[in-house]
Amino acid sequence: MIGEYVTFQLDKCTGCAHCVKACPTRAIRIRGHKAVHHPDLCIGCGECLRVCPEGVIQSNVESRFPLDKDKTNAAIISPALYSQFPDTMPCDVLRAVKKMGFDHVVDLSFHLEMFQFAVERFIAQNRETRQAPFPLISPICPVVIRLIALKHPTLLDNILPIRRPAVMIADDVRKKLQSIHNITGSEIEIFHITPCPSKALSQEMVLKDEIGSVDRTIGINAVYPEICKHVENIREKELDIYDTDPFANIPNARGPMWSKSGGEINPLRDEGLLAVSGLREVRNCLEKIEMGVFDEMNYIELRVCPQGCLGGPLTAVDRHMAKQTVQKLVRTFGVNRRLPPYKLQRLYDRGWFFANIRPSDFTDYYPDQRRALTIDQMQEIENLVSLLPGVDCGVCGAPDCRTFAEDVVRGRAKRSDCFRLREIDNNKEGNT
Amino acid sequence: MAALKKSFQLKSRDFIHAGEASISVQNMLKQIGIESALIRRVAICAYEGEMNAVMHGENGSFRIEVNTDKIILDISDEGPGIEDIAKAMEKGFSTASEEYREMGFGAGMGLPNMETHSDRLDIESEKGQGTRVVMRFSLSPGSRENKTGQSA
Ligand SMILES: Nc1ncnc2c1ncn2[C@@H]1O[C@H](COP(=O)(O)OP(=O)(O)OP(=O)(O)O)[C@@H](O)[C@H]1O
Ligand code: SF4
Ligand code: SF4
Ligand SMILES: [Mg+2]
């Protein structure tokens, strides 16, 4: 179901309301001293689990993963994984993951290059005609897409209609493995090792194309200790993976760079590119795009996590350290283009890069939130807000006074939950 | 008749908070189910108007009124006023200082944008007396995606 990105283990919940205040979409309230989560407003950003002091909130990305030995298991590696190991070559990280028991390890760097090619082509084709709405918004961060669907539906059409690299590759991997091992699709299990709680629902990802492409997701933090153990033991160069694994490309620094804010647009040859990371900054940027401030820009990379995906909630090492590691890798390996443009152009012309479903089909992704208030109800909210203390004390269980007023008008909270309104209402009763 | 009114005070040259009135208007219109394309137009006008009052004017005030058939943005200030309104309306005309241009303003596109995106734009101004910019947007029956079945 939509929005089941996090689970609350309420027995440990103390009702401290840290999560209520942290949630960007106001999807959490306190009722009876316990957190109440509204999945229909949740975008899976993971802010709540970052701030919960009691460890009540868990990402629904898996943390344990007994591999099913009867299946062929492939792991797609999020580029952010390479940033977690300061003194390890990316190819050794791949080897270590393989040692965990995966039959195949899948590096994304070629598909990142393909994606970036498609971005350049799309901008070049549409810039003059302005047939696509500009500025284009990167489709990479699923939380951004959901934030747009929920709060900025006017911008759904600005989302670049190109498939994400992990999706492109998941389809490829399944097809290739079927023919190599002569097995059916259901005998293959594709994992995605990710820093991102918003990928918890492999069945419910952003674009419908993605349904079924990844079978299971695992947080980087869950596999980190085991990878560390194996990385230690990769002393002598075990070149084996490149003989047996069609997807274990030799990574350059394009992947690591991608996981850092700005790394998606940095290799592009275009002008008018912008990269923004961190939830607050991203929200700010979306508001400005809506007001036309960035109309002259071509393409905007948005990542809700601070510093980009390497700051994702399911990473294992400090994001500033991870950033250092990325910078080192970029210096050492560079981000050269390795794919012949004419081949990519052919794929592009065939429409291979494009998502079948337009993001605007998600207009009703969050139906409850989009249920409109009447003008009278809106005025009622304004009137209530003027009565409220305005200090956002949170005792009512809502994150702030305005949200509480909205809850009252929408029938989700009682006036008496607020001490000030209780006072006012009691006085009124006393006077009559 | 149902009418929704809200007003904001604007602080001159406070670029940290400039834009907040427009954002809050935008959010309000989303909540009452105004159609996306119209919200976009109002948002652009609100923002340009708010920025002009903050940048060129003094003691600005920003009011919005939503009726069943129209939206009115009424932005006024007590600043220097506009000497030649026709000139100010020209694309590219700007008196913005070097400092503002460095901040990304001063393309002289604000007023032309407001004219394009509103259904009607009225400017009253006199040198030394301040400026009042009123923009109207008509709400055709289709422009409120009025979802029935309120979640009350
Ligand atoms: N509220 C105001 N008070 C005084 N002068 C104004 C006001 N609004 C606009 N003007 C004058 O009109 C000119 C044109 O305004 P317009 O908004 O089109 O461009 P701009 O503000 O200079 O630049 P831009 O909006 O593109 O950043 C301004 O440079 C200024 O001289
Ligand atoms: S994951 Fe994000 S949107 Fe969902 S409840 Fe937590 S903070 Fe709110
Ligand atoms: S920034 Fe990256 S890790 Fe964070 S939510 Fe977006 S895609 Fe996931
Ligand atoms: Mg202006």
Image (cartoon, coloured by chain):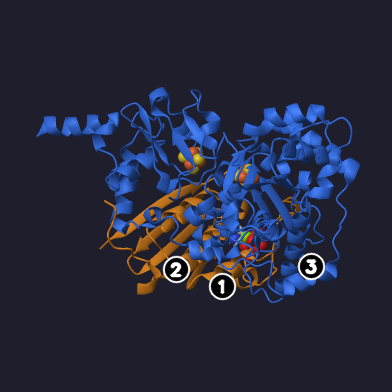
Chain colours: A blue, B orange
Q: Nearer the viewer, mark 2 or mark 3?
A: 3
**The disc numbered 1 marks a residue on which chain?**
B
Q: Work out how far the residue at label 2 is from the one at label 3, CA to CA, in angstroms.
A: 49 Å
User: For residue A99, what is the image quadrant?
Assistant: top right
Inspect the image, locate mark 3, and give the three-letter code of the amino acid beneath it: Leu
Residue at which label 3 appears: A344
Tell which circle, 2 or 1, labels the residue nearer the N-terminal end: 1
Evaluate whether residue A93 shows in this view: yes
The circle drawn on residue B7 is none
The circle drawn on residue B136 is 2
Residue A196 located left or right of residue A272: left
Residue at which label 1 appears: B116
Inspect the image, locate mark 1, and give the three-letter code of the amino acid beneath it: Thr
Residue A381 located left or right of residue B78: left
Q: Is mark 2 within 8 Å of ligand 1?
A: no
**The disc numbered 2 marks a residue on which chain?**
B
Q: Nearer the viewer, residue A141 or A352?
A: A352
* Residue A372, percent from left and from top: 35, 58
**The disc numbered 3 marks a residue on which chain?**
A
* Residue A336, percent from left and from top: 88, 54
Q: Work out how far the residue at label 1 is from the one at label 3, CA to CA, in angstroms.
A: 40 Å
Inspect the image, locate mark 2, and give the three-letter code of the amino acid beneath it: Arg
In which quadrant is the C terminus of chain A drawn?
top left
